[in-house]
Image (tube, rainbow, N blue to C red):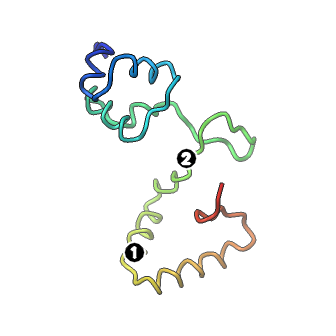
Amino acid sequence: MGVSQADLGKSIGVRFQQVQKYESGANRVSASRLWAIAEALEVHISHFFVGIRASDPETGDKTAPTDEFCFLKEHDAVEMLSIYRSLKPAHKHAVLSFVRTLTQDAPVRRFDEAK
């Protein structure tokens, strides 16, 4: 991108050594720091995820990270979430209980369970 590690470090508030650690994978990058890096480099945050694919449930290939929110690409899912957000708490609970009964035979990971 034509930006030195020192310049990038200054723009995101860290020293160039920390940028080196991010670049080499020695240190993890937090979401907020990744956002700052994207802004400093004037790229969309998705730039850092090009080429990452969800693991293949049919083959069991787990070499790539799983995108648990890929369902949000579906219009109906986004509409359902939008409607759900507008419900009263008691109605939210009722809807969630109903949907759980629809999936009794299918293995579904509940988000309130520990990984």
- Tell me which corner region of the image, top left, top right, bottom left or bottom right, holds residue 82: bottom left
24 shown above or below 27: above
- Tell me which corner region of the image, top left, top right, bottom left or bottom right, holds residue 11: top left
The structure residue drawn at horizontal position 39% and vertical position 31%, both measured from the top left corner, is 47
57 shown above or below 2: below
Task: List the residue tagged with mark 2.
Answer: 67
Amino acid type at circle 2 is Asp
Q: Residue 18 location, x and y as percent?
A: 40, 22
The structure residue drawn at horizontal position 42% and vertical position 17%, both measured from the top left corner, is 20
Q: Residue 12 location, x and y as percent?
A: 28, 29
Q: Pick the residue in front: 30 or 101.
A: 30
Q: Which secondary structure lies at badge 2? A: loop
Q: Which secondary structure lies at badge 1? A: helix
- Tell me which corner region of the image, top left, top right, bottom left or bottom right, holds residue 23: top left
Task: Tell me if mark 2 has few (under 14), some (14-19) or many (20+) residues whose alpha carbon lies within 10 angstroms of its own.
Answer: few
Q: Residue 41 location, x and y as percent?
A: 28, 26
Task: Tell me if mark 1 has few (under 14), some (14-19) or many (20+) residues whose alpha carbon lies within 10 angstroms of its own.
Answer: few
Name the disc covering residue 107, or none: none
Amino acid type at circle 1 is Ile
69 shown above or below 59: below
Task: List the residue tagged with mark 1.
Answer: 83
30 shown above or below 15: below
Tag 2–tag 1 contact (CB < 8 Å): no
Please identify the quadrant where the N terminus is shown.
Answer: top left
Q: Pick the residue in front: 84 or 16.
A: 16
| Side of 65 where 72 appears, left or right | left
The structure residue drawn at horizontal position 63% and vertical position 75%, both measured from the top left corner, is 100
Please identify the quadrant where the C terminus is shown.
Answer: bottom right
Q: Earlier in the sequence, mark 2 or mark 1?
A: 2
Q: How far apart are labels 2 and 1 at the CA level?
A: 23 Å
| Side of 81 where 10 appears, left or right | left
Q: Residue 21 location, x and y as percent?
A: 46, 20
